C-alpha cells in the first residue's frame, strides 16, 4: 500500500500502522512462550488506538491498563474483563472502584496505602479481588533513566525485601486475595541479564511465600523487551522465553506478560512532508510538517528514529548531513541532527520509522496543532482509525468564563450603572 497514496487522501502528518506486523509480533511472542500457556496482556499505554487493541484482542490478547481511561478503552475495543490487568503506582479511589465493579482479572498493588484502600472498596462492594503485589527487585535495567522502573530509587513497586510482610498483611485483609507476584523493571531492554536477575529474585520470593502458606499461583513478569530503532541488537522472544523457563519455569505458576513496545513499535511509521529546505551558515535544515507535539520521543528521551524518504532516492544520490526539525517554536523540536540524507525538496514525503509505540499516544496540541490522523493498513486495504483533529474541534474544547460572556461581568455592570 503506497504511503504516498494515503498521504494524498488524508494529508500529513499521519501515523500508519501495519496489521501484518502487529499480528506477526504478537504470534512470535505468544508462540515463544506457548509452553507456559501464558496470558498475554497488551500494554495499552504503548498505543491506545481502539483498532490496535482490537487487533490484539482478536488474536486472544488481554490488556494491561494504567488508568480508568485505558480500562474503558480496552473494554470498548472488545477485551474481556477477565483478561484485563490494572497496573500503575497512583490509582485513584474512583479508578479502583471502577476496576472492582468491572470484575477484571487482577489489580497490581504498589503500596500499602493502595492495598488498604482496595480492601475497603472491595469489601464495600462485597467482592473478593485477585491482586498481585508489584515488587521492586532493585535491578538496573540498563535502559534510559526515564523508562527504568526496577531500582530502589524508582517510584514503582514495593521493596522486595519488605514483600513477605506485606503479603502476610494482604492475606489477612478482607476483600483481597493475594495470588500473584508482579515485576516490571523498565522498557526497551535489549540485554537479557536484567530480566534474569529480576525473575530470579521473584522466584526466590514466590518460593518463600509458598512455604509460608500464601497461595501464590500466578507470576506477572511484565514487559520491557526492546526493539530495533537504530543500532540496538534486541534478543528474539525465543531467547527471552529461555530466561523465563530457566528462572521461574519450575514454580508451577501461571504466567502473565505485558508487552507493549515489542508488539507495536516497529509496526508503525509517522509520515511527514518537507515544508522547506533551509541552508544555514553551518548546517542544512529539513523543516517538516510533523513536530515534537506529534512525536515527543526525540525531544523527551533523545531517542533515535530512522528517517527515510518515501520516494526511493537514486542509487548514486549523495547523502548530506541534515538537521530534521519541526515547525514548533522550541529548539527541542528537533528529530535528528546531522543525519545523512539524500537530497530532498519541498513537498517530498519522509517517514519516521519505529513510531508505533509511544508516538501518537503521547502527542499533544502544543502550539494549537491538531492531533494527527492515524491509519491502519491490512493487505491492500486501509482505513482511518482516528481522524485528524480539526482546529475548530480543538478550539471548541475551551470555554469562556461566565464573566467573559457578552453582556455579563464587571464591565457590563458598570455600563448599566452609567
Image (tube, rainbow, N blue to C red):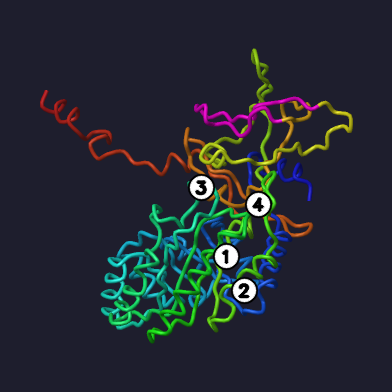
Asked if residue 199 is positioned above or below residue 139 in the image, the reply reads below
Residue hosting label 3: 362
Asked if residue 78 is positioned above or below residue 186 in the image, the reply reads below
Marks 4 and 3, how far apart at CA? 17 Å
Side of 329 relative to 27 (left or right):
left
* Lower sequence index among marks 3 and 1: 1
Q: Position of residue 8 (x, y in %)?
A: 72, 40
Q: Of tags 4 and 2, which is closer to the observer?
A: 2
* Lower sequence index among marks 4 and 3: 3
Q: Is residue 330 magenta?
A: yes
Nearest the camera: 365 or 354? 354
Q: Which residues are magenta?
A: 319-339
Marks 4 and 1, how far apart at CA? 38 Å
Quarter holding the C terminus?
top left
Residue hosting label 1: 196
Cβ atoms at labels 1 and 2 below 8 Å apart: yes
Marks 3 and 1, how far apart at CA? 30 Å
Q: Quadrant of residue 277?
A: top right
Circle on res. 31: none
Circle on res. 246: 2
Q: Residues within 10 Å of mark 1 (few under 14, many from 20)?
A: some
Q: Of tags 2 and 3, which is closer to the observer?
A: 2
Q: Which residue sits at x=62%, y=80%?
A: 37
Amino acid at each position: 500500500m503506497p504511503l504516498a497514496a494515503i498521504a494524498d487522501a488524508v494529508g500529513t502528518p499521519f501515523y500508519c500502522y501495519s496489521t501484518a506486523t502487529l499480528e506477526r509480533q504478537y504470534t512470535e511472542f505468544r508462540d515463544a512462550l506457548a509452553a507456559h500457556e501464558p496470558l498475554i496482556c497488551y500494554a495499552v499505554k504503548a498505543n491506545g488506538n481502539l483498532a490496535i487493541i482490537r487487533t490484539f484482542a482478536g488474536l486472544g490478547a488481554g490488556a494491561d491498563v494504567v488508568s480508568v481511561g485505558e480500562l474503558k478503552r480496552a473494554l470498548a475495543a472488545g477485551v474481556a474483563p477477565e483478561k484485563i490487568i490494572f497496573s500503575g503506582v497512583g490509582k485513584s479511589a474512583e479508578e479502583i472502584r471502577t476496576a472492582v465493579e468491572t470484575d477484571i482479572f487482577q489489580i497490581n498493588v504498589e503500596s500499602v496505602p493502595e492495598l488498604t484502600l482496595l480492601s475497603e472498596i472491595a469489601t464495600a462492594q462485597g467482592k473478593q479481588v485477585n491482586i498481585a503485589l508489584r515488587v521492586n527487585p532493585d535491578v538496573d535495567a540498563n535502559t534510559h533513566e526515564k523508562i527504568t522502573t526496577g531500582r530502589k530509587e524508582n517510584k514503582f513497586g514495593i521493596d522486595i525485601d519488605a514483600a513477605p510482610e506485606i503479603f502476610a498483611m494482604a492475606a489477612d485483609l478482607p476483600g483481597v486475595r493475594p495470588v500473584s507476584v508482579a515485576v516490571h523493571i523498565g522498557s526497551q531492554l535489549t540485554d537479557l541479564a536484567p530480566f534474569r536477575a529480576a525473575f530470579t529474585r521473584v522466584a526466590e520470593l514466590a518460593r518463600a511465600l509458598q512455604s509460608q502458606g500464601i497461595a501464590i499461583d500466578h507470576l506477572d513478569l511484565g514487559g520491557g523487551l526492546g526493539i530495533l530503532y537504530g543500532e540496538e541488537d534486541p534478543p528474539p522472544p525465543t531467547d527471552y522465553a529461555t530466561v523465563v523457563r530457566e528462572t521461574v519455569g519450575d514454580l508451577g505458576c501461571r504466567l502473565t506478560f505485558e508487552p507493549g513496545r515489542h508488539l507495536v513499535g516497529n509496526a508503525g511509521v509517522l509520515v511527514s512532508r518537507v515544508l522547506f529546505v533551509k541552508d544555514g551558515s553551518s548546517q542544512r535544515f529539513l523543516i517538516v510538517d510533523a513536530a515534537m507535539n506529534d512525536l515527543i520521543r526525540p525531544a523527551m528521551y533523545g531517542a533515535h528514529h530512522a528517517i527515510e524518504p518515501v520516494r526511493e532516492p537514486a542509487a548514486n544520490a549523495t547523502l548530506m548531513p541534515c538537521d530534521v526539525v519541526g515547525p514548533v517554536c522550541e529548539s527541542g523540536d528537533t528529530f535528528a541532527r546531522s543525519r545523512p540524507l539524500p537530497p530532498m525538496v519541498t513537498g517530498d514525503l519522509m517517514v519516521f520509522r519505529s513510531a508505533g509505540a509511544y508516538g501518537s499516544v503521547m502527542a499533544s496540541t502544543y502550539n494549537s496543532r491538531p492531533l494527527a490522523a492515524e491509519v491502519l493498513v491490512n493487505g491492500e486495504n486501509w482505513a482511518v482509525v482516528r481522524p485528524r483533529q480539526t482546529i475548530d474541534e480543538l478550539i471548541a474544547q475551551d470555554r469562556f468564563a461566565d464573566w467573559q460572556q457578552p453582556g455579563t461581568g464587571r464591565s457590563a455592570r458598570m455600563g448599566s450603572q452609567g
